[in-house]
Structure formats: structure tokens, C-alpha cells
Image (spheres, grey):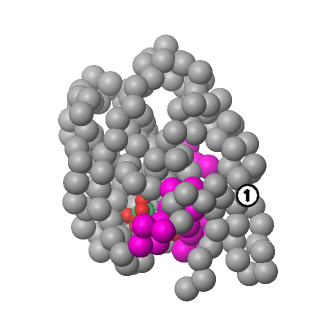
Amino acid sequence: MKEKGSLFLIEEERIKKRIKEMAEEIKKDYEGKNPLFVGILKGAFIFMADLVRALDMDLEIDFLAVSSYGKFTETTGEVEILKDLQIPVKGRHVVIVEDIVDTGLTLKYIKDMIQSRGPLSLKICALLDKKERRRVDIDADYVGFSVPDRFLVGYGLDVAEKYRNLPYIKEIEG
Ligand code: 5GP
């Protein structure tokens, strides 16, 4: 992680290394439990792909698509389910995989929704955590990087659908 000029940046190699460490931690907690990883689309798709490939164990994956920011950079607090899960979560060890926790409103909504369906356990794995922006009491159980209150793109994160394909994470000038 470094500040390039005044712009925040997390390099590709740093992300890879951190995901390997997170996978080791998750493997210790879930090996033999066949957990279900629930990726939140679209932002988490690259993180999810790299995380599950770093996990050498039995697991299943599913995706949930929600709308949050749309073309804007401010959250409304309203979450709309655009695509629901296909695999039932009842009785499963579920890990929600999210790109970034900002105000926490999206994650709170998703967590409550999945919890109401009766999983055996439910944890959250987020690549990025913007703690100072939190508006509801929710924390990820596994966090890749704590990040400052800047608008970030790349590695799945977009602004108006651009930059998701960058292999690194950078701050966008506002
Ligand atoms: P929350 O509900 O926690 O405020 O927002 C979570 C969602 O907002 C994330 O899944 C992500 O889609 C979006 N988001 C929050 N912060 C950023 C950011 O810095 N950059 C981008 N591209 N999206 C963000």
C-alpha cells in the first residue's frame, strides 16, 4: 500500500500476498465443513475468484447481485436484490464475500437476509474496510486491508462500470 503523490494505491502483488494470508486463515476455520461462499456482485467477482483459487479445500460458491451506488458515488441505504442465491443456505456454513465495507448498510441488509434463512454459521470476508465511514454496527470477520475514506476503483470496484478490470486498486480523483 502506498500513497502515490496524494493518491492511494494497493499494488497487484500486495493484494495477491494478502489474499494468500486470508485464505490460510479461512482454511483453518473451515476445512472439512464444505462452506458456501456467497460473492456479492458485481464488485466482489475478482476477489471471489482469487480467494477461492487460493483455498485448497472443498467449498461451494454462489452469487448474490444487489444494487447499491448505481452511477453515483453516494449510498442511499436502499438495497435491491437483483439476483438471489441458487443454493439454499439453510444448515450451511456461509461466508459472505464482499469487495468493500463502507457505511455497512449493504452488508447489514444482506447479512440479516441470509441469517433469516437459517445458516449453521455466517461470517463476512471483505477485501477492503473503510471503517471511518460506518453508519451501522457491522464488522467483517476477515478483512484484507483497512483503507482511508477515499473513492477507490479497480480489482472489481467501479465508477459507472469502468475500471473493474484493473489488477490493482487505486484512488480516483474526485
Ligand atoms: P455500503 O453499503 O457499505 O456503504 O457500501 C458498500 C458498497 O458500496 C460496496 O459493495 C461498493 O459497491 C460500494 N462502495 C463503497 N465504497 C466504494 C469505493 O470506494 N469505491 C467503489 N467503487 N465502490 C464503493
Quarter of the image where one finds residue 138: bottom left
Count of picture labels: 1
Quarter of the image that includes the C terminus: bottom right
Pinpoint residue 135: horizontal percent, then vertical percent.
Answer: 40, 69
Quarter of the image that includes the N terminus: bottom right
Q: Residues within 10 Å of mark 1 (few under 14, many from 20)?
A: few
Q: Main secondary structure of the magenta part?
A: loop
Report whether residue 85 is seen: yes
Q: Is residue 66 magenta?
A: no
Q: Residue at x 38, y 49 (%)?
A: 40
Instruction: Decide which of 30, 73 is in the foreground and name it.
Output: 73
Pinpoint residue 22: horizontal percent, then vertical percent.
Answer: 63, 38
Q: Which residues are magenta?
A: 141-162
- Label 1's element? loop
Amino acid at the residue labelled 1: Glu
118, above or below 40, in the image = above
Report whether residue 128 is seen: no
Residue holding disc 1: 11
Q: Is residue 156 magenta?
A: yes
Q: Residue at x 58, y 27 (%)?
A: 55
Quarter of the image where one finds residue 54: top right
